[in-house]
Amino acid sequence: MLLYKIEEFNPNYRQEAFDGEDIKGLDVYAGNTDEKIGTINNVLVDETGRIRYFAIETGFWIFGKKVLLPVGLCRIDFDAGRVYATGIRSKQQVESLPRYEDGMAVDYDYEEQVRGVYRTPTAQASAPVEASLPLEAPRVIETTASVSTPPPVATPATYDRDSYTYEQEPALYQVNEQDHQKLRLYEERLVADKTRQKTGEVAIGKHVETETAKVSVPVEKERVVIERITPENADMAVNPDIAFNQQEAVRMEVYEETADIQKQAFVREEVNIRKEVERDTVETTETLRREELNVDTEDRSGVNEGNLPPKDRF
C-alpha cells in the first residue's frame, strides 16, 4: 500500500483537514506527560487520503532520529500546540524503531518493523515467579491442594502482506474521537473599517469674456512742401542751354506710417487646484458577547486544569 506526504497528496490539507491550521511543527510529548520528545516533521497518508503516520523529528532526545508514529497512538491538542504520543512509553522503545528518512519508500516490511514495536503484547512472556519463603519459616506441604496450571500463552496475531489492511489494527490506525475532540469558543470583537463614499463634486472650468479695448498708436506721415524763394544770384546770367533743359525734374519719395494692430494671447495668472484631507475620529459603543468554557465532571482526577482559566478550575 502506497503512502504519500500529505502536502503532495493534497496541497490544501491545512484548510480541508485541520481548519486552516498546520499540524507540522507541533511539539510532541511522551504519553500524557510534559516530556518533549520532538516535533511533527511530516504526515503520511494512504491512497484514500487517510492519515496513517506522523513523522517525528526527535531532535536532541535521540540525536536527530526520525521515526514514524501511527495516528491511532497520539492525541492532538491544537489549542496547546501539542501532540501527545500515547503509544510511546520509553526512550528505548523509540530507539528500537527503524529510522525514517524523507523520500524513502515505506513498504510493507518497513511498516511491519514499525508496527512490531508499537503492538501491545497479547500475553506475558512468562508467569510471575512467587517469592521464596524465608529460610526459618516452616515448610507446609498440603497433599490435598490442587496443582494450578499456568495460563495459556496467547498466540500473536499473524498478518499477510497480500491481504493486510489498516482496519485490522484499529489500535494503531483508528482515530479515537474521544482523544481528538475540539470545542471552539467564540467571542465578538469590534472590527473597525472604513468605506469611501462620494459626498459631492466640484467642477472647475474656464469661460471667455469679451470686452472692447482701445489703443492709441502715433503715426507719422511725410508730405512735400514746396516753397518759392528768390535766389540770391537772381541778377546773374546763366547759360540758356542749361537753363531751359526740358529733361530736368525732381523726384522725391513720400512715406507715411500705418497702424498695425494685432491680438496676441498672454498668461494672465495661474490657478492651482488640489484637495486637502481633514481627519476626524468617530467613536461608537457596542455590546460584545463571548463564550466561556464550562467544565462539569464527577472525576476531577482526569482533568488537567493547567490550561483552564482560573474561574473554570475546581
Image: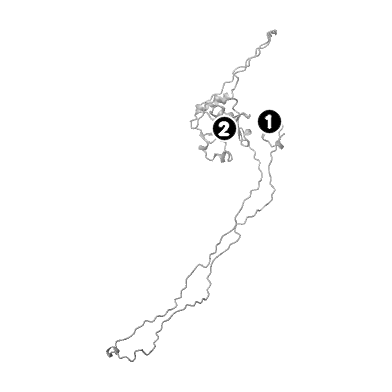
Q: Position of residue 11 (x, y in %)?
A: 52, 40
Say what secondary structure mark 2 lies in: strand
The one of 155 and 301 positioned closer to us in this rendering:
301
Image quadrant where residue 300 sits? top right
Can see residue 58? no
Residue type at numbered disc 1 = Gly
Reading the image, the residue beneath label 1 is 302
Residue at the far bottom in the pictured view: 235
Can see residue 179? yes
Q: Of tags 1 and 2, which is closer to the observer?
A: 2
Q: Position of residue 308 (x, y in %)?
A: 68, 36
Horizontally, residue 112 falls left or right of residue 236, namely right
How crowded pointer 2 is (Cα within 10 Å; few <14, some 14-19, many 20+) is rated as many
Horizontally, residue 198 falls left or right of residue 287, namely left
The one of 149 and 110 positioned closer to us in this rendering:
110
Reading the image, the residue beneath label 2 is 39
Q: Position of residue 123 (x, y in %)?
A: 60, 21
Q: Earlier in the sequence, mark 1 or mark 2?
A: 2
